[in-house]
Amino acid sequence: MIRLMQCVNCGGRLEGAMTFCPYCGVRQDIDLRQIHFRDLGCDGSMQCPSCESGLSVIEFDTDPVISVERCHSCHGIFFNPGELQALLDMQTNPLVWLDTVQMQQIASDYGFNHEVVYRKCPMCSDRMSHVNFASRSGVILDRCGTHGVWVEGGELRRLTEWWRVGGKLVFQQDEADKTKRLFADRPPPWSQIPGSIESPEKTQDWTWSNPGGKPDVPAWLTALGALGALIID
């Protein structure tokens, strides 16, 4: 479904999920139009990975409160681990259905248009890697393995649309598959314990194989019995 909007600068018509106005070239702030938040001001210690402007701290009106860093120039947002999924969950009906046609349409509309630029994490300055969110969303994020993900302006809205039409279920399955692969090559912990069920220790066999129906007695025990008899006598 195509939503019609207007440019915040010149009033020009915007179709679909345009992030730049085709008339004046101004980037559009479309991510937070339906989200309540508070702007807590600029955090001088962190710079935008895209345009190097100072990042501001904003709080989403969620329970619990989610605080993120956002660039007022390019509208990118930096989420700590788990915060992006939590925000998407809070904007979605708990009863999510799977609309594969809509999901494929969103992925084809937005996917694989990401400029190949390896940006620095705003917290540690290490180079971030590119990741296709949930492997199939078509939305490419910049990820720091330690501190979180950088979401470019316009991508949060795209992720929200994808999440609502079943992307949440795809994400949960993707995480389950990652966990399964992580533990697939690891031996179970009990297999390394001596004497466990998987690898029991060898013990002295006591059998009932002789014709008299009595157990076989080790030679040292027989000799010890004889020595005891001599001492008693």
Image (cartoon, rainbow, N blue to C red):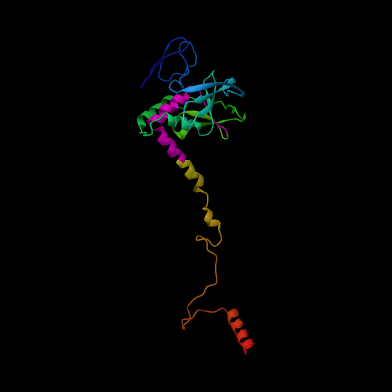
Which residue is at 41% across, 30% downward?
163
x and y, in percent, of residue 69 in the image: 55, 25
Res. 217 visible in picture: yes
Identify the residue shown where x is 44% and y is 30%.
Answer: 88
In reply to whether residue 8 is colored magenta, the answer given is: no
Q: Is residue 150 magenta?
A: yes
Coordinates of residue 47 in the picture (x, y in percent): 60, 23
Quadrant of the rendered image containing residue 176: top left
Picture layout, residue 122 above or below residue 13: below
Hey, which residue is sitting farthest right in the picture?
231
- Please tell me whether the stretch drawn in magenta is mainly helix, strand or loop: helix
Above or below residue 146? Residue 24 is above
Screen quadrant of the C terminus: bottom right
Answer whether residue 137 is visible to the viewer in this image.
no
* Left or right: where 195 falls relative to 89: right
Q: Where residue 146 appears, x then y in whole percent?
A: 58, 35
**Quarter holding residue 106:** top left
Query: Which residue is at 63% across, 84% downward?
Result: 227
Span colored in magenta: 147-175
